[in-house]
Image (cartoon, helix red, strand yellow):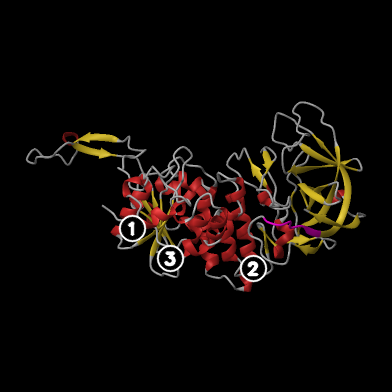
Amino acid sequence: MYKIKLIESLGLTGSYIALSHCWGQDNSPLETTRKTLSSYLEEIQFPLLPKTFQDAVRITESLGISYLWIDSLCIIQHDEEDWKVETSKMEDVYSNAFITLAATGSSSSHGGCLFSRKHITDHGISIPHKDSKFHSDRALVPGGVNIRYKLGSHTDVMEQYLLAKFGGAPLLNRAWVLQERLLSPVFLHFHKEELVWECQESTSCECGFLEWEAVSYDNLQQRGEISIKADFIRLSKTLGHPEAQQETYNFWLKAIEYFTSLSITKDSDRLPAVTGIARRLCKSIPGCYLLGIWSSDLARGLLWQIAPYQQSVRVTVPSGCHLPTWSWASVNIVSTNYYGLSYSEISSPFQIDSRFNIQRSGLGQNIFVPGQRCSLLLSGAFIFCTLKCERPAENFIPSHVLNFQDQEEYMYIDVSCDLNTVGQSCRSRKVCCLLVGGPSELGKLVWTKSERIETRVYWSLVLQQLASGDYERIGVAAHDSKQGWFEKAEVKQITLI
């Protein structure tokens, strides 16, 4: 029987293995709390461990490693202070692990890593030997030949970055796992069908398909669908080089699009769940990291949007914390339809409007998780317009429209609001738009009343004023430059909270 206990590192160094796993909703994993800490420092009885933990212990021991890091046991649960300290170390935990064991095929800590290999696709064909050319009357041959359909595990692992959701890899639908996978030097997937190995140099599977498809990354690149993992590996080799700065910004926007499509139990965990990635990128990005947005790429970072057919709500944060409306983390999509927030329409290279300026961003330091108030002091071309709701039920045309001097533009509203009354003529409200900028070349105007037309598109923040005089973000809007909404606009300074 295994002798297991918690170890307080206190400067102790050595090789260790990390575990990436789904906690599960119905059956919580074994946890360390203030009540159990002292006893766990003496011993954790092996039979008390859920199957995933037991399998991880067996694998760790077989690899000759003495230490195993499991989040629910190595972070004191229901202890806010310890949680803050330990979650800020995620970059170090996973990037320094000898290997990360990923219970990819299990939806809870009770599912395990090691499976009986009864495959989901195991509905093949059995061919008796007497019907095959290998049959010999002179040989005693048992049974028959079983032919199985091809494995799907490598597809589950590789194509999930293309926003395909697979039942065979529930771990990869969890938001926390993104940074665990990106930061780990080796991420070993324990799928129900086979093992899949990911490292900084290659990706391999037991059946050999990924080696046979060695050019798959090249094919994806030609289609513009290179995986986030491959992008991150490539960026990690150039961190600190000035020429990699723009690529790093683009990677971050792409990663947030994907991250916000994943499931997370606590909305308030969304920023902590990408802190490890942000800390790694801080080494090559100038300026400050402000609650999910980089101050040196603030103009584009502010222009996240929600697809018009998705429903969303404002995230609730603990008392005493402030999560500003300008951060993408302030919104939770409740009907993802496989998509998260989007930056895809914000073309690069992006040309900031000459009148848009950042007077103050945050507090002049990195802010990784919500805390004290963090506001932006912005100035730019500023207009007042009317927001109303239009809800044609027969298609996905956005339901909110801005009206300015008898001209109309569609907007992407952040959260569901009282204007969202289906089948009725909704009342309107006064809002304002602050112009940010747009692509430096012709693009496609995403939404028009009649058709898609080629034009130069400019993007603005749609804001509403609070009783305090400050402004909050309620959405973004795409403007056809030919309409000239901002040509004679007033330049105004505002505080965005």
Q: Position of residue 70 (x, y in %)?
A: 43, 54
Q: Is residue 477 visible?
A: no
Q: Residue at 31% of width from left, 43% of height from top?
A: 117
Q: Is residue 376 magenta-colored? A: yes
Check disc 1 and report the residue beneath it: 60
Q: Which mark is residue 208?
A: none
- Residue of label 3: 9
Stretch of the chain drawn in magenta: 371-377
Residues under labels 2 and 1: Cα distance? 36 Å
Q: Nearer the viewer, residue 447 or 336?
A: 336
Question: Residue 366, position in %: x, y?
Answer: 66, 64
Q: Residues within 10 Å of mark 3 (few under 14, many from 20)?
A: few
Q: Earlier in the sequence, mark 3 or mark 1?
A: 3
Horizontal placement of 310 versus 204: left or right? right
Dot 2 falls on a residue whose secondary structure is loop
Decide whether the magenta segment is chiefly helix, strand or loop.
Answer: loop
- Helix, strand or loop at label 1? It is helix
**Residue in front for this viewpoint, 116 or 371:** 371
Quote the CA–CA distance across marks 3 and 1: 18 Å
Q: Are marks 2 and 1 in contact (CB under 8 Å)?
A: no
Give the amino acid at mark 2: Ile
Q: Of callouts 2 and 1, which one flags the residue occurring earlier in the amino acid sequence?
A: 1
Q: Nearer the viewer, mark 2 or mark 3?
A: 3
- The tag on residue 285 is 2
Mark 3 element type: loop
Q: Residue reaching furthest bottom?
A: 241
Mark with earlier residue (2, 3) = 3
Cβ atoms at labels 3 and 1 below 8 Å apart? no
Amino acid type, callout 3: Ser
* Residue 40 horizontal side relative to residue 79, left or right: left
Q: Closer to the observer: label 2 or label 1? A: 1
Mark 2 and mark 3 residues within 8 Å of each other at the beta carbon: no
